[in-house]
Image (cartoon, grey):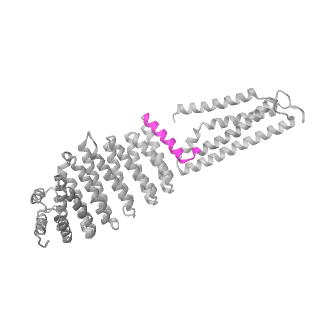
Amino acid sequence: MGLDALLKKMFLHAFVSGTVIALVFTFSPKGFAGDTDTARNYLSTIVSSLSTILALCISITLVAIQLTASRYTHRVLDLFLKMPFNVSLILFYFVTIIQSLYLLSRIAEPIRETLPSYLQPQMAADMILVVFCFAILIAYLYAVMRLLKPERIVAEIERECLSAIARNRSREALDKVEQICDIAKRAAGDMDSTTGLIAIEALEKIANHGSRAARASVTKQFVEIAAIAAKEREGGMLLFVLSGLSSIGTAALHADRLQDARDVIHAFERIVRTALVGQQLVPFVEEAIAAMYHLAAQAVRKEQATRMSECVEFAEKTFRSIRNIGEEVLLFERDGGAYVARVILAHPFGSLLQDLEQVAPFVTEEMWPLLIDYAQLAKRLIARVELSELALITSWLREDLLRYQKDEAIFEHELILVILLAALSHYGNHNRAVRLLVHAIASIVAVPHSLFAKLERNARTFRVLFDYSDARPHLQAVQTAFEEYRKGSAVTV
């Protein structure tokens, strides 16, 4: 809230409270029927009681504020001090206490004398003000309790952040982002997923409407929040973070902010590689991989994209990040091979490949970088897994090759993958894997000789897969195996 708006609110509260007090003094009847002794006792009691109540109220409120600040953020104290209700409470209590002391000093008559008529309206006004004091106290406590709710704290900071962004105050906006992130981190540490969700939703709004600096800050902070949630095994918070990142990435792509989308992909990769892999949190790794594939697909499916080449490059680099994650999973996760085969190298990759074929003129170097990234991960997979896990890939390839026989581009690229995987298996002396690939594919399609010739011509392009040795002998061995199978001979490798 800006200073001007805050002053206006405080002035409004002071004006309304002052008006009510003035009306009470102006129109109070002669309603007090007691004597001077009763008036003195009443006024003394009122002064003592109201002073005690005000002191206790402020003390208890400050303790509650301090506890809330230690749990969420120090900003709670600032929000409390800016609460306009403070003006009304203090004004009513101070006026009532001072009025009571003033009347007490005006009663000069002896004990049990009738109270002078000119003091009776003021005594009635004092009694009415006491009623208002208790009413305003209840309203004040309700306002404080609302202020201490985490959703209210987050909403206030979010509003101030968006206001700072609208006024181009980047430093102030970043401070607000940090405060909301602190709340989310503490919620993750305390396993308070409800508060965490509130904070993450606020960060999503800031990322979607904020400046470039604010958006980048939110994305980086999500990595830290996820790390704390993973350490505490707070699954709810992890899901909120992954879902929030996916939403931010989707909004960035819709707004043609590719750099923001790249930041999201890097955040996913960092979260998975530093916080999830090796911690038996594979379901969350799968969630992150699915989100990354989804963002890559969205980038290349954009209609009338103004920067389609960059979108395709984004999709290719996204798969490279996915490949890096897959390598980590193979190294550190039990049964990581089956996971990589199913979640990374099978149907999800096929969907991405199909999307890229729709924008083939923009694809880098006839899709060789993407195919090489795929083959690099598959090479590590073949060296580590049983045939049953590799069969997940061959089953997908069989389905796709049968489905896309009339789509020459997809059909050719998937056959290239088959040949590369078989050649890499031969290079690594995994002959059972070669036979599996040959039996699975040669039984449904015939691999044209021209495709082997094309691969031999481009052998230098993918020689990194063969540790920079000559790939042609392995390609020729695979070609021979396919020919033997088609002739009905035993496959010898």
Give residue 254's position: percent from left, percent from top: 33, 42
Q: Nearer the viewer, residue 107 or 142?
A: 142
Q: Is residue 54 left or right of residue 327?
A: right
Q: As displayed, is residue 209 above or below residue 183?
A: above
Q: As displayed, is residue 418 above or below residue 202?
A: below
Q: Residue at x 31, y 58 (%)?
A: 325
Dividing the picture into quadrants, the one containing residue 336 is: bottom left
Q: Is residue 149 left or right of residue 317?
A: right
Give residue 262's position: percent from left, percent from top: 32, 47
Q: Residue at x 22, y 46 (%)?
A: 359
Give residue 47's position: percent from left, percent from top: 76, 39
Instruction: Please tell me whether residue 163 belongs to the stretch shown in magenta.
Output: yes
Q: Is residue 43 visible?
A: yes
Q: Residue at x 54, y 44 (%)?
A: 152
Give residue 154's position: percent from left, percent from top: 50, 45
Q: Is residue 182 visible?
A: no
Q: Quadrant of the C terminus?
A: bottom left
Instruction: Please tell me whether residue 465 belongs to the stretch shown in magenta.
Output: no
Q: Is residue 319 left or right of residue 443?
A: right
Segment colored magenta:
146-167
Q: How many marks?
A: 0
Q: Residue at x 35, y 47 (%)?
A: 249
Dividing the picture into quadrants, the one containing residue 130 is: top right
Q: Is residue 155 left or right of residue 250?
A: right
Q: Nearer the viewer, residue 401 or 192?
A: 401
Q: Main secondary structure of the magenta part?
A: helix
